[in-house]
Image (cartoon, rainbow, N blue to C red):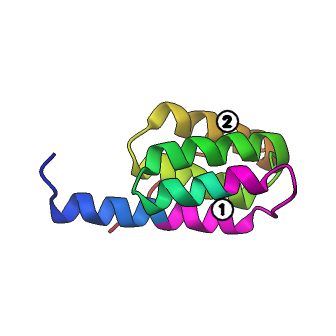
Amino acid sequence: VMVTPDLLFSWSRTEQYLLQAKGLITPTPATTGALDEVAEYLEHNELGIAGDWLRSIVEETNWESVEILKLLALAEASMGRSENQQVLDQRLTQLLGHPHETKLPAA
């Protein structure tokens, strides 16, 4: 993979969304180990795996949190993982009561 400025920007943006989402999850005995795993993956730039772990934690603990779900959907959009983004957007649509489609901010 050729590392371009665009790719570096995308990685940085994705990492910020994931870190923000992680920061909104209250550590509990049930989530602490998983949140440690997420931190480890983020440290090694394994953003996709970190996103998968976060989503799995959120589905079990914070599936009602619009703020966390929006950040995860932005991270998925930033990684170009539109299927995952659409699942999160569907959940946001249910929670918000109106259609929600994640759009990345213009760079």
Which residue is outermost to the right? 29
The residue mark sitting in front, 1 or 2, is 1
| Residue at the spot 37% in from the left edge and 66% down from the top edge | 12
- State the image coordinates of residue 19 (x, y, percent, origin top left): 57, 66
Q: Which residue does the image show at 35% across and 59% down from the upper left? A: 11
Between the residue at mark 1 and the residue at mark 2, the CA separation in whole angstroms equals 21 Å
Res 98 visible: no
Determine the residue located farthest toward the left in the rendered image.
2
Label 1 environment density (alpha carbons within 10 Å; few <14, some 14–19, many ≥20): many
**Local secondary structure at mark 2:** helix
Check contact, mark 1 vs mark 2: CB within 8 A.
no
Q: Is residue 96 left or right of residue 56?
A: right
Q: Main secondary structure of the magenta part?
A: helix
If the image is split into quadrants, where does the N terminus sit? Answer: top left
Magenta segment, which residues? 16-35
Examine the structure image and report whether residue 59 is included in the region drawn in magenta: no
Q: Which mark is residue 101?
A: none
Residue 76 place in picture, x, y as percent: 49, 46
Q: Earlier in the sequence, mark 1 or mark 2?
A: 1
* Residue 26 visible in the picture: yes
59 and 73: which one is in front?
A: 59
Query: Which element type, helix, strand or loop, lies under badge 1?
Result: helix
**Would you name the residue on which mark 1 appears?**
22
Q: Nearer the viewer, residue 15 or 81?
A: 15
Q: Which residue is mark 2?
A: 90
| Badge count | 2
Work out whether 12 lies above or below 48: below
Task: Look at label 2 and name its amino acid.
Answer: Gln
> Which one is nearer the viewer's eye here, 49 or 82?
49
Q: In the rendered structure, which amino acid carries the disc numbered 1?
A: Lys
Give the left or right position of residue 17, taking residue 100 as reference: left
